[in-house]
Image (spheres, rainbow, N blue to C red):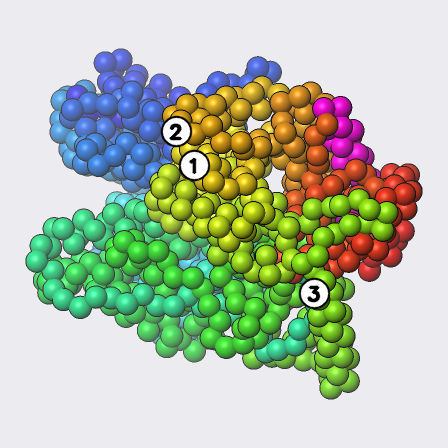
Amino acid sequence: MVGIVIVSHSHRIAEGVAELAREMGGPEVRLETAGGLDEVDGADGRQRPIGTDAVRVMQAIERAWSDDGVLVLMDLGSAVLSAELAIDLLGDERRDQILLCEAPLVEGAVAAAVTAKLGMALEAVAAEARTGLASKIAHLGTEMAGSIAAETSPHDEAGPVPAAEDEGVIARLSVGVAHGLHARPAARFVQTAAGFDAVVTVRNLTTGAGPADGTSLNGVATLGVREGHEVEVRASGPGAAGAIAALEALAARRFDEPEAAQAPEATSDEVSLPPERDRSEPSHVDEDADTGLLTGFAASPGVAVGELRRLHAPALAVPPGEASDADVELDALDTALRATATAIAGQRDGVAALAGEDDARIFDAHLLFLRDAALLEPARAAIRDRHSTAARAWHDAVETVGATWDGLDDGYMRARAIDLRSVGQQVLAHILGVEMPAVRLDAPGIVVAGDLTPADTAGLDPETALGIVAAHGGPTSHAAVLARALGIPAVVGVGTGALSIPEGTILAVDGARGEVRVAPPADDLARFEAERRLRLERLARLRETSSQPATTRDGTLVEVAANVGGPGEVAAAVAAGADGVGLFRTEFLFMQRDTLPDEHEQEAAYRAASEALGDRPLLVRTLDAGADKPVAALRQAPEANPFLGVRGIRLGLARPDLLQAQLRALLRVAADHHIRVMFPMIATTDELAQARAAVERARAATGVDADMEVGIMIEVPAAALTAAALAAHADFFSIGTNDLTQYTLAADRGNELVARLNDPLHPAVLRLIALTVEGAETHGRWVGVCGELAGDELAAPLLLGLGVRELSMAGAAIAAVKHAVRSTTLDDARALAARALGCPSAAAVRNMLGAP
């Protein structure tokens, strides 16, 4: 008997549908549910959180498993994505026996249960589920359905007009959203039309374009429907009236576009994160159109002047040749489409968690590209009929549709071709089995984007990326951190207005003040150039002594180290004067790839870094994935709050295979080099005990009894407050002020809307640093800082006064920080720290330090 799985965002809806289906089909029907996010209802009786979880869907399929197959019915949105991911988790051997059905949830489940009880095959059960609405439509009739649509119509007419029998049902819709049916509203239109058993077409009455397939995103969007245009929608088939009614209602809701969505959407290369702020509310960020001034957050010091540039991903080359087996190529295309869908769904979940559904909807359009008949039918036809490879067929289909976008009159709509080609490149990379090429600049200038991923920023060349301006993010976002590491002046959180500035416009960036001048006059350009020259001259003087030790005027030696993301950055850090590496971010070995690095690859990376350091220490942080550092190859289930979820050491303990591979690789290198290892996100002594036990298991497995210091990061307030207990089991502490600040002040470090709260100089954070040092001293442990505060030359004496004796930072900051250490005495530093701890706010501390 065919098994049935009900997937819903709501646990109660899923159980209710299952109860009704069992009543009709009988208790012997194999029927399981996956609704909501938690395993059990809350203890206080509240309903489980709304949402879908791919792991729970997978488990429900396993419970309903039958050799006859499993039919999966879903309600909407991410339920479909979770079901698709669940199939991938189950593996290829079961995929052909699972069918995801687009039938209506309630009626489809009842029809499927009745048919499954009769012992029918999987396809027959699915076909019966798809006709679940037929009896309702027959009972209500098109006249009643039309009257329902009239009640929701935004027009004066009496709703959709029944046409001649061969024409179906027709309605006219006025489009009243900014930029017309661009990606997000077009995606909503397509999703709505596809939810009915009907053939839907749409025509732009204002321009005469069309008709186009109403379930094709490319078909709808390339009609060039702009604000104020009128479209004609036709639907035929059993669900025609319902489709028209739903589309009328969607138009009445302005296609579910938020009122504030008047600024252009970000493209795939410029992912828009938090929604644009309400300018009526006070904010650190300001835009002054009259003076051409954008103000945001000072992210990386320095001054830069240049033309506005946007990042572009180089096109992948399609190998020549014909396919010998069409079935193999079709399977390759389908596999690549599924893999890309999984990756995009993960991006969508991440943006939705950070910024909400409105900003995440752009990814709905990207997902629809992967199911669009305008792309898939020509690609599959080329494979079947013309012996094309999957790569060639997909590339040609994307370029054909992209050319249609390019031919539109509306420049804003033409820009949406970037989204299509970006998604197309992701699919092509999966087909070819290669990594997506890193984004690049076509010419030197100031990079402007919605936000930059760590991989995007790490791939920038300071010779061409003269400065960075990001619409979103805070001063400790990853884009800001890496900009400082590269020594590129940067301002973040300037607002989405920056995204509408034409490419080629002259920008002047002041990364210390957090200011961007748009098309500045000649006198401003001269001032910026003078400031840039003075700063470079000062840095040149400081770098003359950067390789010398950092010793205070009264003789206290302070280790000044570098934060790096891979072995390739170590030589530059040493040249900048680093006494060692105080943070080797191993997650960069894992990101932007489909497979996990094996033990030998990791050992080679750690050994290369150690050899570049000579006898200097290499401090390696074990994998700190999760939250804002996702690793696609780990296939982690979505979490409602990933910053408080399975990340850092929690992931390492949950995946001992990953942790053991890292530790074994590190121990082998430690046999010949000075290696320190530290565990991230430690919150309890139990976690530290488990981590230390993992080190001993790795020692036993390798037989290497190397002298390797084992420490922890202090990022969680609980760890700072219990530092004395933790110090009994750790050789050292390294304070990650970025995460410690965001957890202490409950302010996401990547969200510019709360970034003004996220200040590591807040007295609460400083007191936690003091408590950490106090706890470490009870067991004679040393304390370092590897967060961004360590690279602030004004804060260096303050940290020394709090008891910190190691500072690790971006290489570009080493010379200035060493100079700051040499310019103070320990007594003066302690007096400064005492005054800072008595300040009422971060602003007061900054004023005391003389910070801008």
- Earlier in the chain: of badge 1 and badge 2, it is 1
Residue 509: image x %, image y %? 68, 70
Residue at left offset 28%, top offset 70%? 400
- Earlier in the chain: of badge 3 and badge 1, it is 3
Residue underneath mark 2: 702
Q: Is residue 540 magenta?
A: no
Q: Residues within 10 Å of mark 1 (few under 14, many from 20)?
A: many
Residue at left offset 47%, top offset 40%? 672
Q: Amino acid at mark 2?
A: Thr
Which residue sits furthest bottom?
Answer: 522
Residue 343: tell me if it is visible.
no
Contact, CB < 8 Å: mark 3 with mark 1?
no
| Residue nearest the observer in this picture, 165 or 726 | 726
Cα distance, mark 1 to mark 2? 8 Å
The region drawn magenta spans 759-779
Dot 3 falls on a residue whose secondary structure is: helix
Q: Which quadrant is home to the N terminus?
A: top left
Q: Which quadrant is home to the C terminus?
A: bottom right
Dot 1 falls on a residue whose secondary structure is: helix
Residue underneath mark 1: 668
Cα distance, mark 2 to mark 3? 42 Å
Which disc is residue 794 wearing?
none
Residue at left offset 52%, top offset 29%? 650
In the picture shown, does residue 280 fall above or below 124? Answer: below
Q: From the viewer's perspective, is 773 left or right of 403?
A: right
Q: Residues within 10 Å of mark 3 (few under 14, many from 20)?
A: some
Contact, CB < 8 Å: mark 1 with mark 2?
yes
Magenta stretch: helix, strand or loop mostly: helix
Residue underneath mark 3: 543
Q: From the viewer's perspective, is 129 left or right of 711?
A: left
